[in-house]
Image (cartoon, helix red, strand yellow):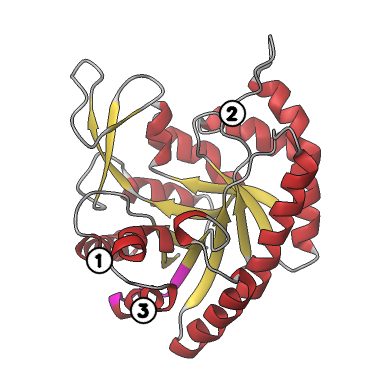
Amino acid sequence: MRLAVSSYSFRNDLKEGGCDHFELCRLAKEMGFEGIEFVSLDEGDFCCEDPLATAAALRDYCKEIGLFIVAYAVGANLLSENVEEEVRRAKRRIDTAEALGAPIFRHDVCYSLKKKEGYSYEDAIAEMVPVIRKLADYAAGKGMRTCTENHGYIFQHPLRVKELMQAVDHPNYGWLCDVGNFLCVDADVMKAVSIAAPYTLHVHAKDFFYRSGTEERPEGYFGTSGGNHLKGTVIGEGVVPVKESLEILKNAGYNGWVSLEFEGSEDNIFALKEGRKRLAAYLS
């Protein structure tokens, strides 16, 4: 496995520190990462005025400094009332991924279930399958693979994501296994990673502090689906069994990229340097 870093990890620098995407590429290379994963050049805090032109320029710059672009990650709601527009939007983001030269395109699937009586996550799977296949086909024509992360509560539990993978059953579609996110739905991380391993196309490594729901929620923490409390931290400082999770993936035959995704309150430059050092030790 090889180590990359997500541009999401630099969000404070991008929003407040005057850092741009080219500077964070330089920082990632300087820290010793071999690759970088970009997040949503088309929208939100990471938005660029001309995403396609910026993506092409980033591709050239990363090639120049010897930094691989390993993935492009975006949001998506495939249960949208206007799903055709959502598909067009996702395809435009696949075009951005192509301009980047990213081999992996991660899209979300939904953030909530439709407010219809009796509407279940199984109904959502049936509704989204043809849309996910359409995006997988479109990306295949551009030489990249698509995937969905265990992310966003509705499709974050490993058994639900597994059902989604089996229902889509497309050779160009798989799982972005985020080893930390399983805690957001109070799943056993190592069991969850074992479930994800056969479908995994890409990996996120992160860590969390944990507090029981029997305690009052501490400042800076967010809630899990089971009422417990999490807060992002430096790899190796929290409760996520990152080393053991990577060993499970390795033993299952995964040999791709691992992107460090930091979302804690510590200084992110320190957190990324320390996290990369620890991940490298885990993989040695």
Q: In which quadrant of the rendered view does residue 209 lie?
A: top left
User: On the image, numbered disc 1 is attached to which residue?
Assistant: 277
What is the secondary structure assignment of the residue under circle 3? helix
Amino acid type, label 3: Lys
| Alpha carbons under labels 3 and 1: distance apart | 14 Å
Q: Quadrant of residue 278?
A: bottom left
Q: Is 256 in front, or is 54?
A: 54
Nearest-to-viewer mark from 3 and 1: 3
Q: Is residue 60 left or right of residue 95?
A: left
Q: Nearer the viewer, mark 2 or mark 3?
A: 3
Quadrant of the frame with the C terminus: bottom left
In the visual, does 186 lie left or right of 70?
left
Q: Residue at x 58, y 74 (%)?
A: 55
Is residue 205 visible in the rendered image? The answer is yes
Disc 2 to disc 3, C-alpha distance:
36 Å
Report whether residue 101 is seen. no
Q: Is residue 140 above or below residue 148?
A: below
Q: Is residue 159 above or below residue 252?
A: above
Numbered range of the magenta stretch: 31-36
Residue placed farthest to the top in the image?
A: 117
Dot 1 alpha-carbon crowd within 10 angstroms: few under 14, some 14 to 19, many 20 or more: some
Furthest residue toward front: 49
> In the image, is 236 to the left or to the right of 72?
left
Residue 122, position in %: x, y?
A: 69, 22
Neighbourhood count class around disc 2 (C-alpha, 10 Å): few under 14, some 14–19, many 20 upward = some
Q: Disc 3 designates what residue?
A: 29
Q: Earlier in the sequence, mark 3 or mark 1?
A: 3
Q: Secondary structure at mark 2?
A: helix
The amino acid at mark 1 is Lys
